[in-house]
Image (spheres, rainbow, N blue to C red):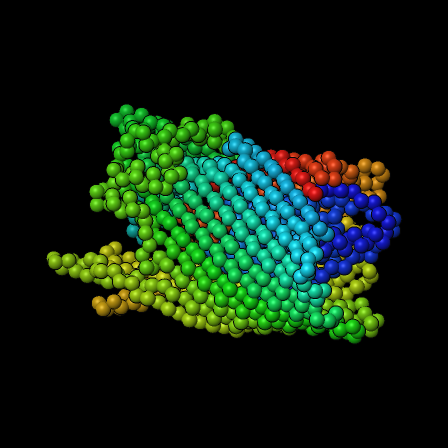
Amino acid sequence: MTKMIHMPRRAALMAGISIASVALGCSAHAQDAAAPEQAAPPAEEGDIVVTGVRASLSSAQSIKRNSDVIVDSIVAEDIGKLPDRNVAEALQRITGIQIQRSFGEGSSVAIRGLSQVRTEVNGRDVFTANGGRTLSLEDVPSELLAGVDVYKNPSADLIEGGIGGLINLRTRKPFDFDGFKASASASVNYYDMYGKSKPQANLLLSNRWDTGIGEIGVLVDLAYQKTAFRQDQISSQPFFLLDQSVAANGTPNNATDYATAQGLGRLGKPTYLPHGVGIGQYLGDRQRIGADVAVQWKPTDTLLVTGEYVRSDYKFQYGDYSFFAYTGTNSITPDYTAPFTFDDDGNFRSGTFVNVPIDSNTSLERRKSVTNDFSLNVKWNPTSNLTVTADGQFIRGVTDGQRSIVILHSNAERLYQVVGNGVPTMDILPDSNPANGNGSVTDIANYAPLGGGYLDHIDHSVGKEYAGRLDAEYKFDAGIIRSISGGLRYTDRTAVTDSSTYAYYGTSALADNLYEVHPFRGDLYRGYQGVPAGGVFFSRGIVLDYDATRQALAPYVDASQRQSLLDGVSYVPSDRNTQGEKTYTAYGVAKFDFEEAGFPLDGNIGVRVIKTKVATDGFSVQTPQAELPNGEPTNGAISYVPISVNSSYTKALPSLNLRYHFTDRLQLRLAASKGLTRPDFSQLNPNINIVEFNPGNGIRTSSSGNPYLKPLEAKQFDASLEWYFSRTGSLYAAGFYKKVDGFIANIATDETYDFGNGPFTVSVSRPLNGDNGKIKGFEVGGNTFFDFLPGLWSGFGVQANFTYVDSKAPSPAAQDNEGNALIVPLEQLSKYSYNLIGFYDKGPLSARVAYNWRSKYVVTTRGNGSGELPIFNAARGQLDASLTYTVNDHFGLTVDGVNLTNTENRTYYGIPSRPQSSVLNDRRISITARLTY
C-alpha cells in the first residue's frame, strides 16, 4: 500500500536499495541478466519522503541510472498495481514506445518504429502459440508483474531476437519479502458503451521459513480478469478514379467509367468515387487467468535454488453486426438526378447511388491461448568473486481459434453517402418504383429471397521449447577489468500450426425465427443519426454458439453439403505448417571501469555467437489439368507432395556499452551493437497451392511462405545524456540510429511448373529478404516532484517525454488504386509521439493523470478489404487517470478511468480526404479495493 516514511539521509539511502531490490527480484541468473544492477544514487540532503508513486519512480529511475546498458523500466507501485491495467498500455508511457490497440485495449508494441520486439518473462523465452515468436501482451494479467524493463540496445549477455528491442516482464519471488506477505485486491470495471460491468481480482501469498535443510520460501500469485468491450465503426469503401481515357479512334477505354463521368458532368476532371459504405458493431469480452508459483531454497549461504511455474490463460470472443452496401471492384452507379459534390482534387464528398448490393453479416471470432512455463534455476557462489548459474526451462503454448460468418444478401435501392470532415453519413432509401419493393433495410422480406452464405474457419497452434543455459561470472577485486562473464545456451523449439481454408456454403431463405432486426440509428456511435434505422441479421444469439450455428443452417444448404456443414470444417494436409528450430549460443562479456586510473569511464564489451538450425515441413498442393470425356479441359485429381527444407546460419553479435561520468549526477552513455530478428514461423511456411487449368487465360497466381528466409540484422548506435538531480528527478536526451539489413516483403515473381502436360508459369507471391532500411531519431524526457513547494503543493509531480522517429525502408507492396508505386514509412510508425503525466502523492492521497499522443502512421501498405490500398491512421491522443486513497497501512481504494476523452480513431486511404473508418470504443471506469499485510 501507499505509505509515507520519513527518514534521515542514510536510512533513506538504504531504503532506496531495498525498494529497488524488491522491485527487481533478481534471484536467478536468468533474471540477473535481464534486470540491471542496482546501486542507490547519492543521498540527498534533508529528509526523504517515500510513497507508492514516489517509490516506483525512484526505483525505475535507479534501474535506468545504474544499469550497464540503456534501459527504461516501469515498477509496480504496490503488489498487483502497475500504473496501467494492461501491460501494453503501461509500456506506452516509456519514451520511444508506440502501441497498437485491438478493440480498445493495447495489444502490441513497437520500439523506435520497429515491431520486431523480443518478449521475455524473468529473462527467459515466452511466446503465444500463433505462428509468431513473441508473447501477445494482451494475454498476461498485469497484476502478476513486479515491473517491466525495456532494453533498446541490448548487450551480448542478453538473449538475441529483437532488432527493435527487448521487453522483460518481471514477477515476484518469495525472497523479495522479509517474511510473510499477503495482498488481495478486487475490482469492478464498467464499460460505458456496452453498459456492462465485469469483475477482477488478485491474490498473493508469500512466506519464508528457516528449516533444518536451509531457508525455504514459497509464493503463490493468482490473477483473474474479466473485461468487456464494444466497438462501433462507420466506414467508407475504397476510392477509385474514373477512367476517362479514350483510344486513338476516340472510343473510351472504359465505357462504364466514361459514361459515369459524363452523367456527373465531370468529363475532363479527375473524379474519385467510393464503392460503398459499411457499419461494424463489435460486442465481446476477454478473460485472463494468470498464476505464478515460485519456490526458493537456500541450503547454504552460497547456494540458491529457484523453481517457478507461470501460466497465462487468455480467452477472447466477440460477435458482431457488420453491414455493407458495397460493389467491390465493380463499378458503382450514381443517381444522376441527385446532387453530387466533390472537393478541388475530385474526391467524392456527397451524393446518391442506385442498386448497391448489401451484405448483412453476423459473425463469431474466438481465441483461446494457454501458455505454461516451467523453470528451474541454481545459483552458486563458491567464492565472493565467482558466480555460477545453471538455468533450465520448458514452455508449452496452445492456441485455438474459430471464425464463422453468416451472410445475408439484400439491395440498397438508393444509397445516400457523405464523407469528408467528421463521421461518414449513410442512409438507404427506397426508389420511386414500387415494383422494386419498399426499400426498407429492416424488412426481412427484402433479405430472404436473395439468400446468403456461411463461412467457416478453425485454427490450432502448438508451440514447445526446451531451453538450457550455463553462465559464470568472475569479479576482480581491483584493476580496470572488473569482471569477466560467459555462458552457453541451447534451445529446441517446435511450432505446429493448423489453419483451415475458409469453407463456404450457400444458403437459401431462412425461417423467420432465425432473423434478427438490429437497430443502428440513435444507438450506434453514441446516438449518431447519420446511419440507417437498422438492419436484418442472422440471430447473434445463435452465432455465438459455433455448433448451434451449423445445426441451424443445415436445412438451408444444398443437400450435398449438409453433412459437411454439420461435421464442421476440417484440416487437409496442406493446412499444417511444421517448424523445428535449434539454437546453439556462446557469449562472453568483460566489464571495465577506469575509475582507479583517474578516468570516470566504465562499461562493457562482448560478443554473442549463435548457430541456428531450422527444419521446415509442408506440402505442395498440385492440381494438374485433365480432360472431360468430350475433350474439354478441367481440373484433375489433387495430390499433396511433401516439402522438407533444412537450413542453418551462424551470426556473431558484438556489443559495446560505455558510460562517462561528468559528475555524480550527470552521465553520458554510448552504445553500439548488432542484433537480429528471425522470421516468424508463419513466414517460413512452405505450403503452396498450384492449379494448372486456367479457364480465364489470365495469369495463374498463388502465394506461399519462404523456408529460405534469413533473419533481419541491425547495426544500432545510441547516445544518451542523463542528469539525475534528485531521487525522483531526472532529465535525459537520447539519439539513435539503426541500419536494418534484409527487410522482409512479399514479392510476386514468375515460377515455372510442370505436372506432366508441359511447363506453365505461375505468379507466386512470397516473402523475400529485400532491401535495407534506416531508422533514426531522438528522445527527450524527464520527471520530478515539486518538493520545493510548500505544504500540500509539494505532492505534485510531472513526467513528460517526446520521441521523434524517421524511417527509410522498402515498401514494394504499397500502391495507389491505379497501381502506381508509393513510398511510405514503416508500418505502425508514428514520426512524433509524446506522454504528459501529472502526479499527486502526499499523505493518504495519490493521483495520476496521463495523456498519450502519437502522430499519423501507416497501418498497412496493402489493406485487406481496402482495394489493396495503403491505410493510414490519423493522429490520436488518449487521456487516462487514477485516484487512490490510502485508508491505513493495510487498506486502500482506487478509482481509475481509461479513454476519458472518448477518443475517436480515424483511418484513411493514403490522404485524409479519402476517409476509411471512424471508430469509437468504451470508456472504462474501475473501482478497486486493495488489502496488504
Q: Is residue 238 above or below residue 481?
A: above
In the visual, does 155 lie left or right of 539? right
Q: Residue at x 60, y 70 (%)?
A: 470
Report the residue that reaches farthest toward the front: 212
Residue 211 sits in which quadrant? bottom right
Q: Residue at x 77, y 49 (%)?
A: 728
Q: Position of residue 870 (x, y in %)?
A: 47, 50
Quarter of the picture containing the N terminus is top right
Q: Position of residue 886 (x, y in %)?
A: 72, 37
Q: Residue at x 63, y 62 (%)?
A: 305
Q: From this viewpoint, is residue 521 visible? A: yes
Camera-side residue of 804 and 669: 669
In the visual, does 296 lie left or right of 131? right
Camera-side residue of 422 and 124: 124
Q: Position of residue 716 (x, y in %)?
A: 62, 65
Q: From this viewpoint, is residue 738 visible? A: no
Residue 896 sits in which quadrant? top right
Q: Residue at x 82, y 51 (%)?
A: 12
Q: Is residue 171 above or below residue 321?
A: below
In the visual, does 854 lie left or right of 932? left
Residue 365 sits in which quadrant? top left
Q: Is residue 884 above or below residue 674?
A: above
